[in-house]
Amino acid sequence: MLPSEAAHLMHPTLARAWHARRAENALLVYRAERDARVQRMREESVDDGPDLEARRRVSGPVIVCLDTSGSMEGSRGALAKAIILHLTMTAHDEGRSVYVYAFGGPGDVVEHELTFDGEGVEALLSFLILDFSGGTDVSEPLRRALQRHDDAKWSRADLLLVSDGQFAVPREVVSAIRQRRTETDLRVHGLLVGNESSSAMAHLCSPLHRFREWVLAESS
């Protein structure tokens, strides 16, 4: 489901309309399209390789840095938020915590711990309707993410950076991430939304996942 649909739940009247649209299977959703051959290769190799033990280990929390700058406006931003919403739902089912730093230009950082209980739901919906404009400053959210990783509760967290990659490489942050990797088992995943390549994302993230194709449609 697109975040713009979930945001309707914050308003009493729109919430009733949301439930009606859901009953009619008319909510706007996104559908990802992927190469079937690549998917088959992944399914066939899921139990092979030296990383099997790493995949079997108990997963910890997730710290997300989400780009909500002007370049993410439109379908890219909607898709990115939908992915984070799905991630939060999955993490909730697995008993994992999720903390999100939504960022735009210099000084534009809003942070939430996303949960499905009490005040967490209100924070989640506020996050879904949040947008910034202008440029992209990735330094501050990553700096805050590393500070949170110092906390005992988040010390086993994976870091996920979601962006279209249109920003300059912050050298001091790259150095800090590399040092943290040598000291801990921190993994910094990148999700690159769109067709463009990004050397900045490649410098910051390993592994780097690319999400190039999606279709907006009504639920069925």
Image (cartoon, rainbow, N blue to C red):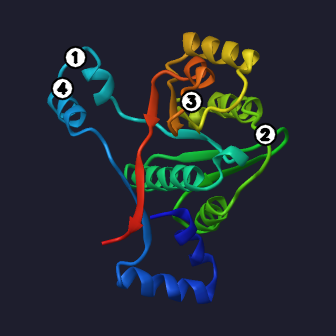
Type of amino acid under label 1: Gly
Say whether marks 4 and 2 touch (CB < 8 Å): no
Q: Which residue is mark 2?
A: 135
Q: CA distance from mark 2 to mark 1?
A: 41 Å
Q: Nearer the viewer, mark 3 or mark 1?
A: 1
Q: CA distance from mark 3 to mark 4?
A: 30 Å
- Mark 3, secondary structure of its residue: loop
In what quadrant of the picture does the N terminus appear? bottom left
Say whether marks 4 and 1 touch (CB < 8 Å): yes
Mark carried by residue 45: 4
Lateral position of residue 187 relative to residue 147, left or right: left
Q: CA distance from mark 4 to mark 2?
A: 40 Å
* Mark 4 or mark 2, earlier in chain: 4
* Mark 3 or mark 4, earlier in chain: 4
- Quadrant in the rendering for residue 198: top right
Residue drawn at 58 percent across, 12 percent down? 183
Rendered view: 215 above or below 150: below
Type of amino acid under label 4: Ser
Mark carried by residue 37: none
Type of amino acid under label 3: Ser
* Mark 3 or mark 2, earlier in chain: 2
Say whether marks 3 and 2 touch (CB < 8 Å): no
Mark carried by residue 49: 1
Q: Which residue is mark 3?
A: 155
Say whether marks 3 and 1 touch (CB < 8 Å): no
Q: Nearer the viewer, mark 3 or mark 4?
A: 4
- Quadrant in the rendering for residue 46: top left
Of residues 117 and 31, which is closer to you in this image? 31
The image shows residue 42 at horizontal and vertical percentages of 23, 31
Q: Is residue 174 visible?
A: yes
Residue drawn at 58 percent across, 84 percent down? 14
